[in-house]
Image (tube, rainbow, N blue to C red):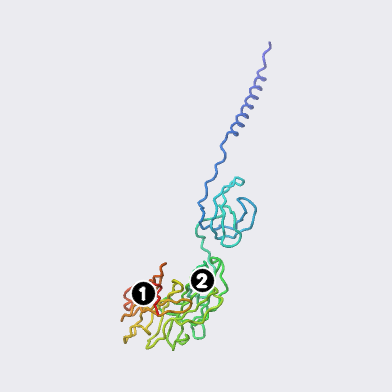
């Protein structure tokens, strides 16, 4: 029997080796581990979420496009994260504050507070701001000056978390700058949505003011579209040296509570007519009787006000002619039985 040529044997061994290598490759692929799912993003139900750029909003994860959201759009996460194998991505369902809501790619969101973005609410200075019960942002500010160099104040509101503000409207008040702070009208939002602005009225400009400074308030029940006539808060100053100053305001109970300093009626009527701290509750635009919190020979200035959930009013001020910081609490929103 003739022997097989060496070259033929080499070809056979080569073919077997190639076949074995291919089989091994196929076997390896068939038993290989699937690609690992990327870790879920740190986004949870109830968190605030903010878009990092213009973002597609879909009806389901990687589903039909329903619209887009701009950069810095704010919303709340309602479902998620959910992994989509179709595009190997995590998706989160978001209810946005405005515009279309739905599923967005988790890589397009950050949780928490968005990168600060400033907008111009109005042209002016000496602003006061408050957030009302419905999440609207209310700002009052000095927008210009009258012929007597008293500031003219305007009002603007944002109903979309500060993305845009309404066209400022001039307030029906004649206020004056004051020292010490606060230097302009102060704003509070009642629980029913009414907006109250308290301010230091320019001499001779308030209904019961014979020529000294006094505290007045205006009130709007339609988000600043219309305002009440000025409401006198401080009593007409009798035997007063300079009248009232430095009003501050906070929502309390069914209305607001206002504090200020005054050397007029009810104050310590010494020869120096030093300033005392007064406080009163205003409900539905009707002020109650003022309470003299201090009634001391030393002068008080710069009151501050805060209210706890139980309706206790906290007051602080600088007393003893500028040498001490003082505190007092007044129950029941400073309401006084008539």
Q: Which of 11 and 294 is in front in this view?
A: 294
Residue 181, horizontal then vertical, whole percent: 41, 76
- Report if the CB atoms under discs 1 and 2 are less than 8 Å apart: no
Image position of 97 (left or right of 269): right
Q: In which quarter of the image is the C terminus?
A: bottom left
Q: Nearer the viewer, residue 288 or 177?
A: 288
Please give the residue where the numbered disc 1 appears in the rendered image. Answer: 317
Residue 155, horizontal then vertical, whole percent: 53, 75
Q: In which quarter of the image is the N terminus?
A: top right
The local secondary structure at tag 2 comes to loop
Q: How far apart are marks 1 and 2 (CA)?
A: 29 Å
The quarter holding residue 68 reads bottom right
Q: Which residue lies furthest to the front in this view?
A: 338
Pointer 1 local density, CA inside 10 Å: few below 14, some 14–19, many at least 20: some
Question: In front of the other: label 1 or label 2?
Answer: 2
Q: Which residue is drawn at 67% across and 17% down?
A: 5
The quarter holding residue 287 reads bottom left
């Amino acid at each position: 029997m003739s022997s097989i040529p060496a070259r033929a044997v080499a070809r056979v061994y080569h073919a077997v080796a190639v076949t074995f290598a291919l089989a091994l490759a196929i076997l390896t692929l068939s038993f290989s581990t699937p690609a690992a799912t990327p870790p879920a993003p740190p986004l949870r139900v109830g968190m605030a979420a903010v878009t990092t750029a213009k973002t597609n909003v879909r009806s389901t994860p990687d589903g039909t496009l329903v619209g887009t959201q701009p950069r810095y759009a704010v919303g709340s996460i309602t479902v998620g994260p959910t992994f989509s194998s179709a595009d190997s991505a995590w998706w989160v369902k978001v209810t946005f504050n405005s515009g279309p809501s739905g599923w967005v790619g988790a890589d397009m969101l950050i949780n928490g507070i968005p990168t600060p973005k400033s907008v111009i609410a109005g042209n002016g200075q000496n602003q006061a701001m408050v957030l009302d019960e419905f999440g609207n942002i209310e700002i009052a500010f000095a927008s210009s000056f009258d012929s007597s160099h008293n500031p003219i104040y305007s009002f603007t509101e944002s109903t979309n978390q500060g993305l845009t503000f309404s066209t400022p409207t001039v307030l029906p008040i004649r206020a004056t700058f004051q020292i010490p702070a606060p230097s302009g009208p102060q704003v509070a939002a009642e629980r029913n949505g009414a907006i109250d602005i308290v301010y230091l009225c320019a001499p001779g400009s308030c209904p019961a003011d014979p020529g000294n400074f006094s505290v007045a308030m205006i009130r709007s029940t339609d988000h600043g579209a219309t305002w009440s006539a000025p409401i006198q808060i401080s009593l007409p100053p009798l035997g007063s040296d300079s009248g009232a100053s430095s009003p501050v305001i906070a929502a309390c109970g069914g209305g607001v509570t206002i504090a200020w300093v005054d050397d007029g009626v009810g104050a310590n009527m010494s020869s120096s007519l030093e300033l005392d701290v007064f406080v009163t509750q205003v409900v539905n635009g009707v002020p109650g009787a003022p309470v003299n919190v201090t009634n001391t020979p030393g002068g008080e200035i710069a009151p501050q006000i805060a209210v706890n959930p139980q309706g206790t009013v906290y007051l602080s001020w600088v007393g003893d002619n500028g040498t001490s910081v003082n505190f007092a609490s007044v129950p029941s929103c400073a309401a006084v039985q008539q």
